[in-house]
Amino acid sequence: MTQIPFHRPYVARDQLAYVTDAMHRPWTSGYGHYGERAVHLLREVTGAPHIVLTTSGTTAMDLAALAFDPRPGDEVIVPSFTFVATANAFVLRGAVPVFVDSRPDTLNMDEDRIEAAITGRTRAIAVVHYAGVACEMDRIMKIAERHDLAVIEDNAHGLGGTYHGRALGSYGLLAAQSFHATKNIQCGEGGAVLTADAGLAERAEILHDKGTNRRQFFRGQVDMYRWVDLGTAFAPSEILAAQLVAQLESYDLIQSQRRSLWLRYHEELADWAAAQGVARPGVPDGCEHPAHIYYLLLPDLANRQELIAHLRARGIQAIFHYSPLHSSPAGQRFGRTAPGGCPVAESAADRLIRLPLYAGLEDDAQSRVIEAVKTFRVT
């Protein structure tokens, strides 16, 4: 029986050729031909005026937090149901993550619970668009404005998603993208920081290059470069950037395939899910998502685990997702939980299963997944 993996990285048409070309160019570290080309293509996709490439989505969050510059003891509101990098970026700067519960329909941060988490030490709200479905950004931006807070987007899932026609990643003072192997657009490991703020972009560029103004020197803006700020090495090599260029050139094809796969799951599993008491992804009006994840929410942990085993026995890999940060050892050590706790996040963590979804998943393979799911009965 052919195994169907949860994910298989898509290899774009010119990916190998670009990598080979990059390897034979005289400059293979960051800021070369492919790095510049990747930034140009990302600007076309996102509309962001300022983009800095990084080695991963995690380092993109690290760079965003470093540029934002919270002080020790400052608080940053984050969702509990997210990857650890969302909170870790601020903890590394001495800030305190304050964990907020999720909405039941989208699993995004519940905007109705944000204001109860705000104190005199709160500096920012870090939003995560789970599965690429937008948070309720109108409400969140108004809350941020009312309390004089910055908004920072962890947009690891959301490249290509929109909220009422506006691109995800364009709302925050800074936004982080991920090009991890599991993302729609991937180069194995890679990321980017996006901002519309020219001053922040200039500082991020310096932080990004070991705290030096070397990029300004290369552009002829200064007569020599110096160590002027904090920083470390965030730039991806030309080998990674070459892969990213090929992926971005195939952006429309990748997105088209993923949206078709997502929609097929959603339509063909609708009756089964209703009959079994299983929830499908919620997509509020005005949200266009990039088909990053297709998940199901089983009634309880036991049924979730049974469905994973049921699919595994049929050669299909399906997996769960996050463990809530507020209940993790480090979350309890470094952060605090907002009033009311995070019961929705806890429940989702126990009940959620992600189905195989990747560009290149063949129709016959997806049919196998759908039929296998339909043969499962909730107990």
Image (cartoon, helix red, strand yellow):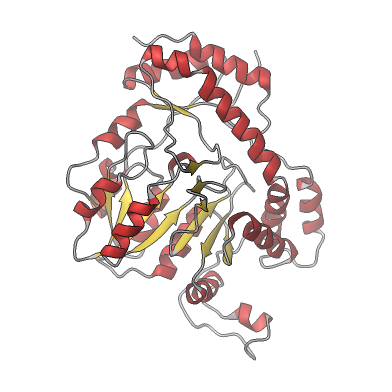
Judge left or right: residue 277 versus residue 232: left
Instruction: Tell me if residue 287 can be seen.
Output: yes
Identify which residue, 165 or 199, lies in the foreground.
Answer: 165
Quarter occupied by the C terminus: top left
Q: Is residue 64 left or right of residue 117?
A: right
Q: Is residue 333 above or below residue 196?
A: above
Q: Quadrant of the N terminus?
A: top right
Residue drawn at x 59%, y 60% as measured from the top left: 47
**Residue 151: x percent and y percent?**
38, 60
- Residue 297 point in image, percent of width and height: 38, 25
Q: Position of residue 6 (x, y in %)?
A: 56, 28
Residue at image location 60% in from the left, 64% down from the top? 235
Visible residue check, residue 317: no
Comparing 59 with 143, the one in front is 143
Q: Residue at x 31, y 64 (%)?
A: 145
Question: In the rendered picture of this protein, how many numbered marks are placed on residues?
Answer: 0
Q: Is 51 placed above or below 254 here?
A: below
User: Of all residues shown, which one is farthest toward the bottom?
Assistant: 223
